[in-house]
Image (cartoon, rainbow, N blue to C red):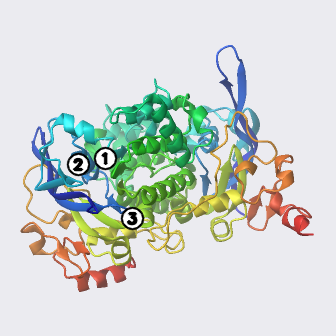
Amino acid sequence: MSEIVISAKDVTKTFMISAGAFRGKKPLHAVNGVSLDVERGEVLALVGESGCGKTTFAKMLLGLLPTTEGTIEFGGTPVANIERLKLASLVQPIFQDPYSSLNPRKSIGSIITLPLKVQGDPNPSTWRRRAEEMMELVGLPPRLYENFPNQLSGGQRQRVAIARALINRPEVVICDEPTSALDVSVQSQILNLLQDLRRELNLTYVVISHNLAVVEHIATRVAVMYLGRVVELKQTASLFDAPEHPYTRALLQSVLTPDPSMGVPDTQLGAAYPNPVEPPSGCTFHPRCASVMDHCAHARPATIVRSAGMVECHLYDENEGRGRIAS
Amino acid sequence: MSKRVLEVENLTVDIPVGAGMLHAVQGISFHVDRGETLCIVGESGCGKSLTSLAVMDLLPKKAIRTADTLELAGENLLGAGESRMSDIRGNTMGMIFQEPMTSLNPAYTIGNQLEEALKRHRRVSTREARDRAIYLLEKVGITAAESRLTQYPHQLSGGLRQRVMIAMTLMCGPNLIIADEPTTALDVTIQAQILLLLADLQREFDMGLILITHDLGVVARIADRVAVMYAGQIVEQGTAEQVFNSPTHPYTQGLLDCIPIPGKTDRGKPLGSIPGIVPSLVGEFRSCHFAERCMYAMDDCTKADIDMRDADSSGHRYRCLLDPATCKTNAIREGVA
């Protein structure tokens, strides 16, 4: 049994959204009761459309947002009780856009060594050497130490962001769309690098991405999110080979593989993404679902444990779903 | 009536920069017929967007455009002045840009902007313009079209905004639509819907479509013909089947090897990559542009410009010194053919 690094239990994040002048505020459940464990050494991917709560959830993992309800535990201690500096040494982020996540007025060296400074590392004389070792590890020539971000290409900047995240040897790295701002040829370099680093430094990744081809390639487990809930959580192979939730199936269908013999898929996800302030009743996916049944609009589906993970859909209820309709 | 909508011959775009002249687009030629989709694919900085801006004459002021031929439905655009070009843009030539939020005016209603697109180019009554707006909004799959006319762009989701943009480009019934990364800012599920819509409308209205993108998946699914650009040049051109099933230029092969393909790439195995970075296009440059990053580079590659040559007799062309048979063997070894 592998060790659990992060454990989230019934995590909810509610924002109060102004509904307009004089109309008061309405709650928006960005994350709505998410429970999941991150195991040491795994790559857990969070996928879903924009607005499904994946970034909000990641921010809570990083301790950047407090949870409204529920707890996130890191190695058994609630994140809320871990001192900020201590948490920062355990979890580090890599963001999407390396153009805006690096300070343009700081040299590469000072960007990479900043976490050491913040953590009050006792040996300032070793910082430069350690930063250069880290640069070598992420594939940056150490001669760039004195350069500035604007002198670097997009791929190199993302390598700087990775070096900065790893200099304090964190246990978990949260990668929020790590390659979606990069070109295809650079994307593959960064993905290969992330894989190598994970093996070398024994890291755990939580990867947020909307690119399912990338997720299939690097993740070991995948959580599909829809309107703040995890609707399917599986080992990568079983999720991609045998998706159960109709939403997962539609997502997988919309992946455009470079195969000219196939046309553009018709995903049947007719209605647009619902307004999260007024989510649909029952199963929140029912207005867009291809396999919708009568009671989907009324009853919220329960979490059903499957061999390789879990799914939340009435189709898989015992004595319900397809079976009951057929009888 | 001829089927040819756009004919471009030897188009170049030069931009003066501090250090000299940036040769952003270096003599590219392509054509689009009615009912045909041409995809221009390449990485950032390869000149694909500048190519489309050059066709529309929307280049930055200091940029210099030259071409041997630039004809839209038989009309020479090279000599066309600014007022003639504004008559053409949005009329016979429609445009769709990447970010629908920035291409719609936030201060005007959807109806206002749609009607304006038609009234700018045709003598029609407000009533007629309104009817056409409703007709087209329904065509692009927007429900309750009439009530949408009074809404503002911020009240619509990204996918709906892009549908409105598409409806707007159709207002005057263009012969040609140029779409620059039309789905990049959208979710994957919405992307598929928008592409499907574009393909359907293009067939229905018998238009030419130029789609500019960096996403090879999009290209493979929607293109009739593909032009792969690298560092200001077209390095490979052919039908989608030719380019994807038998990629010939080492760059095209490298690109296809870089992307994880569900069901084909082994999960977790390292992906292929193209080492190095795109060369600077400032100054004179007499060499194969890809030579520095190419694993098959030879001495001759850096001695002169490389010309396009035929890969076969059916219009599949590429820019490389290697002969087609060698390229094919390489592609099979790389596992991309």
Q: Amino acid at mark 2?
A: Val
Residue, disc 2: B55
Task: Identify the secondary structure beneath mark 2.
Answer: helix
Q: Is B310 situated above or below A66?
A: below
Q: Nearer the viewer, residue B85 or A212?
A: B85
Q: Amino acid at mark 1?
A: Met
Tally the numbered discs: 3
> Which mark identifies residue B331?
none
Q: Is A29 situated above or below B321?
A: above
Of tags 2 and 1, the one toward the viewer is 1
- Image quarter hosting the N terminus of chain B: bottom left
Residue B77 appears left or right of A7? left
> Which mark identifies residue B93?
1
Residue, disc 3: B223
Mark 3–mark 1 distance (CA, rounded to whole Å): 19 Å
Of tags 3 and 1, the one toward the viewer is 1
Circle 1 marks a residue in which chain?
B
Q: Few, some or many C-alpha atoms within 10 Å of disc 3 (few <14, some 14-19, many ≥20)?
A: many
Which of the marked residues, 3 or 1, is nearer the chain's N terminus? 1
